[in-house]
Image (spheres, rainbow, N blue to C red):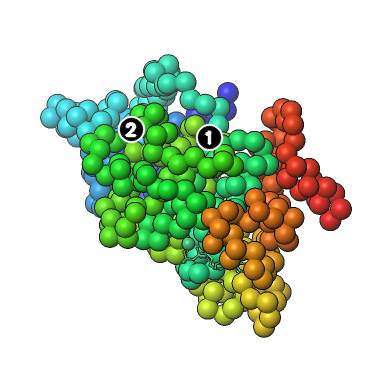
Amino acid sequence: MSPAHILVVDDNEKACEMLAYLLTRRDYQVTTNTRPIEALKWMRRPGNIPDLILLDIVMPAMDGYEFVRQLRADPTVAHVPVIMLTARGHADDKVAGFEAGADDYLVKPINAAELDLRIRALLARSRAAMPARPASEATVLTVFSLRGGVGTTSVAVNLAVALATLWNIQVPLVDLALKKGHCAWMLNLTPRYTISDLVESKESTVDSEIVENLLLTHGSGVKLLAAPMSPVDAELITPAVLDRTWPHLLTGYPFLVVDAGSDLSELTLIALERAHTVLLMLAPEMLAVKSAFDALQVFDRLGFNRDRIVPVLNTLFPRHGLTPQNVEKALGRPVGTVIPYERTSFVQAINSGRPLIITDPKAPASLAIATLAHKLSAAEMESEEIANPSQLLSMVQKLSQTS
Ligand SMILES: Nc1ncnc2c1ncn2[C@@H]1O[C@H](COP(=O)(O)OP(=O)(O)OP(=O)(O)O)[C@@H](O)[C@H]1O
Ligand SMILES: [Mg+2]
């Protein structure tokens, strides 16, 4: 078994260093963070969820009690066990800690052997209590642009259809471009239910069955969580509303595609933070490149790993666009995929409500999106037994052999 990963949250840098020293000597993998708010955000990113948290109580920006409260309210990390560490040994403090949701409590100065014992006991308890989790959670692919109008929805929809078609699987698509809600239109689905239907719920997460009933099923295998019917209702969709469905979407399927639109709202930031890959859309014109550059700077400031961001250059115009080389130079990093210009077929696809990848899978733009979908999913799906490889899969495989 890999070593348990422990997150230490303490505003005192020296205390963090001391605990990291004690714990690494006992073969734990340790991450420290002196800023609780940042630590909560960091934890929500893929691959960062720790096995256990050691938490100081008195911290300036957010105290340990509030930290645990927020942790327990977030379904993606609510299960992580917490040991509170404090200089205060009063019974009232302990009660407050347990009430907030801590699992154990240790008074400083810390004795290394006792700390190790408590950690082992708590890890054993939490492993035993953990519901059987699927071997892997969905790979989240978030499509985003700061510019708008550069093909974000076209790519999100066609990418979801491509994944479903390539592997004969169901792929949830979440429309978080809340004020536009174009995904349902592009798939010709009547939004009988939308994410708005979760606004009234009092639960922090809802049953899988309820989520399944809200998803609109497309013939390709895509299952859409549609945006609100009216842009006015977008304001009611808070992160808590999204989180009523998120755990189910994450554990029920191998991939989850999000159309994150072109706003940097709290909700899109969550979809970006939780993404394994962010497809950053841009067109070959200066304003789109500037917006993509600005987005990359924001991602840098938020501490996103650069490898997670794939710039996708969508050739929106037949002539006079910047070359991919010039775009790369201006961005300061390579473009992951170029989607060719389609004179009429994208517009026809929108007007007919039938995604391009279905109406014309051999169109250059379809092949570019299918190849991208394959690149993002092949490693995960290769281990699966594919009884009847889809035509799209054979086509993409042939293409990759010849290129
Ligand atoms: N490769 C392409 N070639 C030609 N036209 C394209 C291409 N990609 C997208 N389009 C067209 O660009 C327009 C905008 O596409 P889309 O709605 O997907 O963009 P968006 O970024 O989601 O826009 P919004 O900001 O409004 O949500 C559509 O009319 C679509 O047909
Ligand atoms: Mg859109």
Residue at 59% x, 78% y: name it. 285
Q: Nearer the viewer, residue 146 or 185?
A: 185
User: Where is residue 184 drawn, in percent x and y?
Assistant: 46, 52
**Observer able to see residue 340:** yes
Q: Residue furthest bottom?
A: 320
Quadrant of the rendering where the C terminus is positioned: bottom right
Question: Does 355 sit left or right of 34 as displayed?
Answer: right
User: Where is residue 387 drawn, in percent x and y?
Assistant: 74, 28
Question: Which residue is identified by label 2?
Answer: 206
**Real-space Cα separation, disc 2 to disc 1, in angstroms:** 17 Å
Question: Does 237 sit left or right of 292 as displayed?
Answer: left
Q: Nearer the viewer, residue 284 or 333?
A: 284
Residue 112 to residue 223: above or below: above
Q: Can you tell which quarter of the image residue 201 is in?
A: top left
Q: Can you tell which quarter of the image residue 44 is in?
A: top left
Question: Which residue is identified by label 1?
Answer: 253
User: Where is residue 308 drawn, in percent x and y?
Assistant: 57, 53
Quadrant of the rendering where the N terminus is positioned: top right
Residue at 47% x, 55% y: name it. 185
**Observer able to see residue 9:** no
Label 1 sits on what residue type?
Tyr
User: Where is residue 26 drawn, in percent x and y?
Assistant: 50, 28
